[in-house]
Image: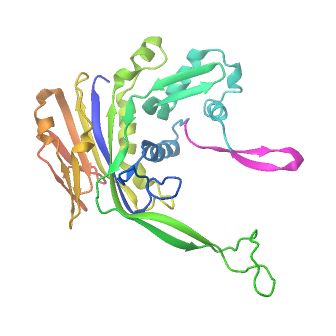
Amino acid sequence: MNKRIYGVIGIKSIMANWNADFSGYPKSISTGEVFGSDKALKYPMKKMWENHGEKVLYIKSLKIDEGKKDETKVRPKSLKERYEEIFEIEDLKKEKDNKKVLMNLFKSIDVKNFGATFAEEGNNIGITGAVQISQGFNKYEFTEAQEQQILSPFRDGKAKEKSKDGEDASSTTLGTKIVSNEAHYFYPFSINPLAYKQFIEMGVTEGYTEEDYKKFKEVALVSATAFNTNSKVGCENELAIFVETEEELYLPDLSQYITFEKSDKDIITLGFDELLNSLGDSISNIEIYYNPYKANIKANIEKAKYINIFTRKEV
């Protein structure tokens, strides 16, 4: 593929928790600005690829271990075990051909997109991904965390508390669910196929192809909407921008020019229209996917196609 792609992926979160820190509250920086990590966005992408039958290496998977004294435990697989599973290898330690390991890594769709740090015995490999996704900052200024009390259907069997008559406490336990009232995250990304130039020369990959871009584009449009866990219900893809340029054109982080305003229909202003319009033939294609039922795009981008993110028809 002889072009670069720059863009933004927008995620809407309504009474949900798109990316929590270890305290359970939405992640934020020291100034209080709420953000989502790139890992929060990549995970539903990987799950969607996995559900479609693609090889995904860097994702949590489980195995059952038959331990001592007839103990059976469920535990996460190691990177070595995951590699052996998806590439049907008996024992990675016996693999002395580093080129073969590299070729296998590039067959994994998440490695092909995001790169990898593969530090296993005899195979210490680092791959810088063609797709780079940065942190996604929330652009809605009135985001607040909401703490909800949840009643469990079960009592705590280990509780030491006793009732007045000396019997075990019979009340059920309380839990907490923390969500944001509303948040709108905008993730900048870039795709640089030249990142794999040396690996192409080594003969371990054909490079980042149009087919790879097509598969990334699909998960960039729908994976958050499709990923319906308890904390992610209420999160959905609301925006995706793809700007295709010449290989030698370099663009800044486009998300920094985006503003969000709450209205009857949300207003998403793309403040980089003047920049893109000034670049002429250096840009070959611009596609802006959004939810026209809930938002209006405010911009004047000459080459842009505005597309319904759900129906994929031009608006």
Rendered image coloring scheme: rainbow
- Residue 249 vs residue 310, the one in the foreground: 249
Q: Residue furthest right?
A: 69
Residue 227 pos. (x, y %): 46, 54
Please give the name of the residue rendered at 22% of the width and 52% of the height, measured from the top-left corner: 259
Q: Which segment did they paint magenta?
A: 58-75
Classify residue 26 by image quadrant: bottom left
Give coordinates of residue 222: x percent, y percent.
Answer: 38, 50
User: Relative to residue 312, is residue 15 drawn left or right?
Assistant: right
Image position, residue 286 (x, y; %): 20, 38
Residue at position x 77%, y 44% in the image: 65
The one of 62 and 181 positioned closer to us in this rendering: 181
The answer to whether residue 125 is magenta is no
Residue at image point 74% right, 76% down: 161
Q: Is residue 213 left or right of residue 154?
A: left
User: With 194 as the anchor, is 153 left or right in this view?
Assistant: right
Toward the bottom, the furthest residue is 165
Q: Position of residue 176 (x, y in %)?
A: 54, 68
Q: Residue furthest top?
A: 201
Report which quarter residue 159 is drawn in.
Answer: bottom right
Q: How many marks?
A: 0
Q: Quadrant of the N terminus?
A: top left
Q: Is residue 92 above or below residue 238?
A: above
Residue 59 drawn in magenta: yes
